[in-house]
Amino acid sequence: MADIEQASEKKSWKKRTDPVVIYKKWCKACSICIEMCPKQVFDTDRDGFPVVTRGMDCTQCSICWIHCPEFAITSNEK
Amino acid sequence: MDQMSNVTHKYLRPKKSFPNVWCPGCGIGIAMGAMIRAIDGLGLDKNQVAVVSGIGCTARIPVYLDFNTLHTTHGRPLAFATGVKLANPKMKVIVVSGDGDLLAIGGNHFIHAARRNMDITCILVNNYIYGMTGGQYSPTTPFKKLSSTGPYGMIEQSFDPAELARTAGATFVARGTVFHASQLSRLMSQAINRHGFSFVEVISNCHTQYGRLNREGSAVKMIQWQKDHAVPVSVAAKKTPEELEDKFITGVLYEQEKPGYVEEYQKIIDRFSRESTESMVRVTES
């Protein structure tokens, strides 16, 4: 758990390399994206918010961002 | 891909109070995203679209949208939308509201807008309960389900909104769920593209009121429930009524062509303006 939080903190300062970006100000931690992702890209942090931990598995299937009720997920793929 | 995922953000008013007002995991946000993608896919201009809503959870949608929006009185979004459409027939008018708003207090407006065949797209987000006011039963609450005003189970029979729209005379009736969000946005774009009264019922989840009272679990569980109980039209045709007992059919349920109110009204205007100009010409000649 600790390393997940560390990773998320590090990535927020790094240049964006995650396949999807979660806008934390709008996220309400409903966990729809975590449950619906077919590749289990997300994990929860201590507060229940999603964190991208297995970004390499992401196939840009668009399921997470079309099911996000808060419009908090955007794709980073060009 | 970047543009695709940011499509919704182009049509939002981010200065409004985001994060939005709905409970975490509410399907209304998903339905709103599907609607935005449908409008974007049709390539409509922001000024060409008017979104009208009444009162309720779902009716908060226009607050966040950067179109011409109208947030009206309880149950009357279709009446206001009729006015908007007749004042400016080029406008694409979309009514988006909940089951309590459109079917209970606005039931009469609903059936008469469908009967008149007004050129309006009506999107009804059906979450089976009055969510905002505290979980009272609505006209679509299923039989024997609990609500805060029916603690021993609903003893009234419920409406089937899609069937009601079809018998009232709507020309396009479809049903989607928030689980099948991409199919939903396809259905919505079909509905917006059509002339005449087109109706899309969206099965949504209210886990805060309906799910809590009926022990249906979290938002994710309720959305998975939709996946298990939705039957596409093509599959449902092969099944017996017993197999479809607790299921609902999704897809385009009904489609037909009928002369719409707006076109007929325009014809009358054209006829009389022609006659009046002809009579004017006759008067000036004599």
Image (cartoon, rainbow, N blue to C red):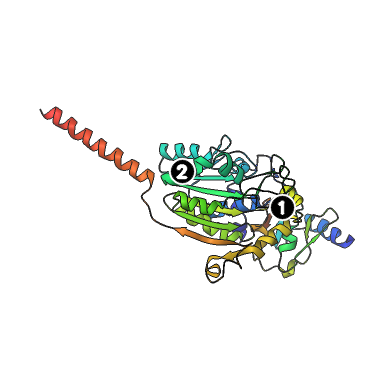
Q: Nearer the viewer, residue B246 or B200?
A: B246
Q: Say which element carries label 1.
A: loop
Distance between mark 1 and mark 2 Cα atoms: 32 Å
Q: Which residue is situated farthest in the right direction here? A: A2
- Could you say where residue B50 lies in the image, as x and y percent from the top left? 50, 42
Please give the name of the residue rendered at 69% of the width and 41% of the height, measured from the top-left corner: B132
Q: Does any portion of residue B223 appear in the rendered image?
A: yes
Q: Say which element carries label 2.
A: helix
The quadrant the C terminus of chain B occupies is top left
Instruction: Indicate the quadrant where residue B73 lies.
Output: top right
- Tag 1 and tag 2, C-beta contact below 8 Å: no
**Chain bearing mark 1:** B
Q: Nearer the viewer, residue B53 or B109?
A: B109
Please give the name of the residue rendered at 40% of the width and 42% of the height, measured from the top-left corner: B89
- Could you say where residue B128 lies in the image, as x and y percent from the top left? 65, 50
> Looking at the image, is mark 1 or mark 2 nearer the viewer?
2
Tag 1: Cα neighbours inside 10 Å, few (<14), some, or many (≥20)?
many
Tag 2: Cα neighbours inside 10 Å, few (<14), some, or many (≥20)?
many
Q: Which numbered circle lies on residue B234?
A: none
Q: Nearer the viewer, residue B211 or B93?
A: B211
- Could you say where residue B277 lies in the image, as x and y percent from the top left? 21, 34
Q: Amino acid at mark 2?
A: Ala
**Residue under label 1:** B25
Instruction: Indicate the quadrant where residue A7 lies.
Output: bottom right
Left or right: B273 with respect to A49? left
**Chain bearing mark 2:** B
Please give the name of the residue rendered at 56% of the width and 38% of the height, measured from the top-left corner: B75
Q: Amino acid at mark 1?
A: Gly
Q: Which residue is situated farthest in the bottom direction here? A: B238
**Residue under label 2:** B113
- Could you say where residue B16 lies in the image, as x and y percent from the top left? 65, 39
Q: Nearer the viewer, residue B91 or B219?
A: B219
